[in-house]
Amino acid sequence: MATETTLTRPHIIELPKIPDQRGNLSFFQNDSPIPFTMERVYWIYDVPGGEQRGGHAYRTLQEFVVALSGSFEVLLSDGREEQRFLLNRSYYGLYIPPLYWRQMENFSTNSLALIVADKAFDEGDYVREFSRFQQLRDAR
Ligand code: TYD
C-alpha cells in the first residue's frame, strides 16, 4: 500500500475568518487553502432527523465539506480504520481525498452541508459496494 502524505489524508482545513460587528465573513478559493481546483459545488439540506447521507467512496474525486449552518458528522474509512469528524462551524471544513468511504450523519435541524468537488458529476466514479472499495484500497 502506498504511503500517504499528510496532504493525501483527510484533514480539517481552517478558513480565513474576517470578524466584523456586522457579521463574520469566511471564504475559500481555488488551491488556497483547499488543495485542489474546484469544478462543482453541491449542498445537502432539509435532512430529516436520523437520516444518513453518503455510504460510498469515489475513485478519483476530491471533496471539501463545510457545515455552513448547524452541524453534522462525517465518518470516514480507509478500509481499515475509521475516523469521525464533527463539523459545526462555518470557518473550517474537511478535506476528503479519493478512495475514502464516507457517511454523513447526525445532522442537526436546519443544517446545511456545502460540498465542493474537483470534478463534474460522474456516477462512474462512485464505488457503492464496500467490498469493492476494499479491493480497490488493497490494490493501491
Ligand atoms: P449521492 O452522491 O449518492 O448522495 P450523497 O450525498 O448521499 O452521497 O447523490 C444522490 C443522487 O443525486 C444520485 O442520484 C446522484 C445525484 N447527484 C447529481 O446528479 N449530481 C451531483 O453533483 C451529486 C452530488 C449527486
Image (cartoon, rainbow, N blue to C red):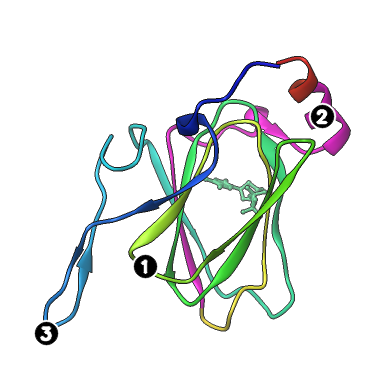
Does residue 42 sit above or below 62 in this rendering?
Answer: below
Horizontal and vertical percent for residue 7? 45, 32
Quarter of the image for residue 105 reads bottom right
- For residue 41, the mark is none
Viewed as shown, does residue 15 lie left or right of 140? Answer: left
Q: CA distance from mark 1 to mark 2?
A: 32 Å
Residue 80, placed above or below residue 91: above
User: Residue at the location (77% across, 38% down)?
Assistant: 128
Q: Give the amino acid at mark 3.
A: Gln
Residue 100 rendering spot, x and y as whole percentages: 66, 38
Residue picked out by circle 3:
21
| Residue ID at (42%, 34%) | 118
Compared with residue 19, is residue 40 higher up or lower down, i.e. above or below?
A: above
**Which amino acid does the dot numbered 2 rest on?**
Gln
- Return the residue at label 1: 90
Badge 2 is on which residue? 134
Point out the stretch of residues depicted in magenta.
Answer: 111-135
Disc 1 Cβ-to-ligand 1 distance below 8 Å: no
Q: Residues within 10 Å of mark 1 (few under 14, many from 20)?
A: many
Q: Residue at the right extreme?
A: 131
Separation (CA) of disc 3 from disc 2: 49 Å
Residue depicted at 29% across the width and 55% down the height: 15
Q: Earlier in the sequence, mark 3 or mark 1?
A: 3
Q: Which element is circle 3 on?
A: loop
Q: Nearer the viewer, residue 2 or 89?
A: 2
* Magenta segment includes 128: yes
Q: Nearer the viewer, residue 74 or 111?
A: 74
Q: Assess whether mark 2 and mark 3 are in contact (beta carbons under 8 angstroms).
A: no
C-alpha distance separating marks 3 and 1: 17 Å
Residue 120: give x, y in percent of width and height.
46, 34
